[in-house]
Amino acid sequence: MTQETTWGSFPEFQDDYIRLIPLERQHQDALLQAAGDGNLWELWYTSVPSAATITAYMEKALMEQKEGKAQAFAVVLRATNTIIGSTRYCNMDKINLRLEIGFTWYAATHQRTSVNTRCKYLLLQHAFESLHCNTVEFRTNWHNHTSRAAILRLGAKQDGVLRNHRLLPDGSLCDTVVFSITKVEWPALKRSLLHRKERHNV
């Protein structure tokens, strides 16, 4: 169940398996430990923090929250109260009622489980039913085939490819694939996600 909120104040979301809690500075060490499950920072096409980048990662997330551009969450496994990853509302546009769900990653142990479906369901439900978004967007690196497949499985549709969209730390340029879900599509997609959650039941 979501709560009515403004675009500048976000609650904690949860179901019977996970919790999404607004990211705070005190979560830094736990996030780094989660990223160490699989050494996720070694994936060159993702933005997962390492010991060398975690401070800048946190500062940027917290600054964009303060500016009203984003809201980051720590993903918590309820059974153990352990942080297992992170996700974020970003590129928030309250004038046009649209936002992006991005910066999503999970510890390797929790990949290819129901965690991603559960997280996306909670975030999409809040975006469409409490924030009354017209569109929710997803973006990923062209080479991140795992992420692209996961976004398509959610029911999002591909809008297109932004060529040479971002400059990577090594100086190379990458293409960004853009997907979206509209408010008209949400009711049917919601039923599909609920069915998947109930079928897997974990």
Image (cartoon, rainbow, N blue to C red):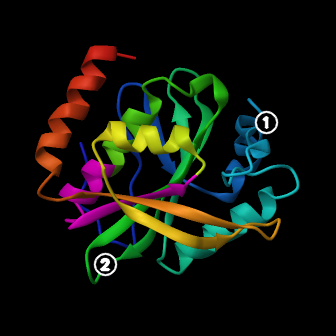
Task: Decide if residue 166 is on the left or right side of residue 117.
Answer: right
Picture quadrant of residue 181: bottom left
Disc 1 marks which amino acid?
Answer: Asn
Q: Name the residue under label 2.
A: 94
Residue 99, position as x, y percentages in the image: 36, 67
Residue 112, position as x, y percentages in the image: 51, 25
Question: Residue at point 57% right, 73% down?
Answer: 165
> Is disc 1 placed on a helix, strand or loop?
loop
Residues at circles 1 and 2 in contact by the CB criterion of under 8 Å: no
Question: Residue at point 40% right, 44% down?
Answer: 151
Above or below 51: residue 7:
below
Above or below 15: residue 179:
below
Q: In which quarter of the image is the N terminus?
A: top left
- In this orientation, which residue lies closer to the viewer: 75 or 92? 92
Above or below 196: residue 185:
below
The CA distance from mark 1 to mark 2 is 36 Å
Which stretch is magenta? 124-142
Question: Residue at point 70% right, 44% down?
Answer: 31
- In this orientation, which residue lies closer to the viewer: 45 or 117? 45
Q: Could you classify mark 1 by the number of other residues whose Cα lies within 10 Å: few (under 14), some (14-19), or many (20 or more)?
A: some
Q: Could you classify mark 2 by the number of other residues whose Cα lies within 10 Å: few (under 14), some (14-19), or many (20 or more)?
A: some
Residue 41, position as x, y percentages in the image: 77, 45
> Is disc 2 placed on a helix, strand or loop?
loop
Taking the magenta stretch, the answer to whether it contains residue 80 is no
Q: Name the residue under label 1.
A: 39
Labels 1 and 2: the sequence-earlier one: 1
Disc 2 marks which amino acid?
Answer: Lys
Q: Quadrant of the C terminus?
A: top left
Task: Decide if residue 171 is on the left or right side of residue 66.
Answer: right
- In this orientation, which residue lies closer to the viewer: 84 or 26? 84
Q: Residue furthest front?
A: 163
